[in-house]
Image: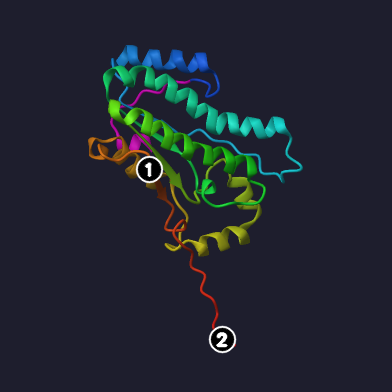
Amino acid sequence: VLEAFCNFYQAYYGHIMGAKMERDMRAEIFEHYQTIDGLVNCAGINKALPLLEIGMADFNHVVDVNFKGIVHCCKAAGTYMLPAHKGRIVNVSSLSALQGKAKYTAYSASKAAINGFTRALSTEWCAQGINVNVLSPGLVVTDINRATVMANPDGYRRRIEAIPRGVPGRVEWLVGPVVMLLSPGSVHLTGQVICVDGGISTGDTFVMDKKQ
């Protein structure tokens, strides 16, 4: 996706849960570019099990990666954004933060935490010129859910039928909203949850059959 939208990019690697590594990585980026203008947090994992079957170690791991990892990254980026009085942060959440789903208690809780954290942080930092928003995708087939989708094609079909646009999301369709949220055009936009989901968060295609 990056190669399709920009002529140059540089990758830096760090463990999402390693606070020291995140700080070191941000310092490396700042040393190279002398600024950190934007941050997109999109790491995520899932452990789809009924609540009585998922162990607390697995539950905590999902929350640690999906939510606490974002906290680490925001703290690291804020170290440079706050003195500069400018910055854009986009935290990627999920439709699962807004709609419940069986066996997704850990995942849904971690994504809902992102929404609440973003609203609070946006209020805390907006006066310093830093906007913090949420991008909330709907159904997009990625490594995190591909096996589940392939194992249940009928369920996948029904989910697509419920989307008002009638098609699942695609990763490249998230690029435009992210670019907008990182751009100067989003100067007065902060603390918001932007749903990119084909309309499923506003309603579905089900119509009650009126026939007797």
Q: Quadrant of the N terminus?
A: top left
**Secondary structure of the residue carrying numbered label 1:** loop
9 vs 162, nearest the viewer? 162
* Magenta stretch holds residue 122: no
* Residue 8 image-quadrant placement: top left
**Secondary structure of the residue carrying numbered label 2:** loop
Q: In the displayed structure, does residue 101 sit left or right of residue 87?
A: right
Can you tell which of label 1 and label 2 is closer to the viewer? 1
Residue closest to the far bottom: 212
Query: Going 27% across and 19% down the picture, which residue do you hit?
Result: 84
Q: Which residue is under mark 2? A: 211
Residue 148 pos. (x, y %): 63, 49
**Residue 183, relative to residue 172: is it above or below?**
above
Report how far apart the C-alphas of labels 1 and 2 lie in the structure.
41 Å
Q: Which residue is under mark 1? A: 192
Residue range corresponding to the magenta coloring: 1-13
Q: In the displayed structure, does residue 210 sit left or right of residue 38?
A: right
Query: Going 41% across and 40% down the picture, which residue do you hit?
Result: 134
**Residue 89, relative to residue 27: is it above or below?**
below
Residue 141 pos. (x, y %): 52, 48
Residue closest to the far left: 184
Q: In the displayed structure, does residue 185 sit left or right of residue 162?
A: left
**Residue 123, relative to residue 50: is it above or below?**
above
Dominant secondary structure of the residues highlighted in magenta in the image? loop
Residue 45 pos. (x, y %): 58, 36
Give the amino acid type for the residue marked by disc 2 in the picture.
Answer: Lys
Give the amino acid type for the residue marked by disc 1 in the picture.
Answer: Gln
Query: Going 53% across and 32% down the picture, which residue do you hit?
Result: 67
Query: Going 44% across and 59% down the picture, which residue do you hit?
Result: 202
Q: Few, some or many C-alpha atoms within 10 Å of disc 1 (few <14, some 14-19, many ≥20)?
A: some
Q: How is the image coloured?
A: rainbow
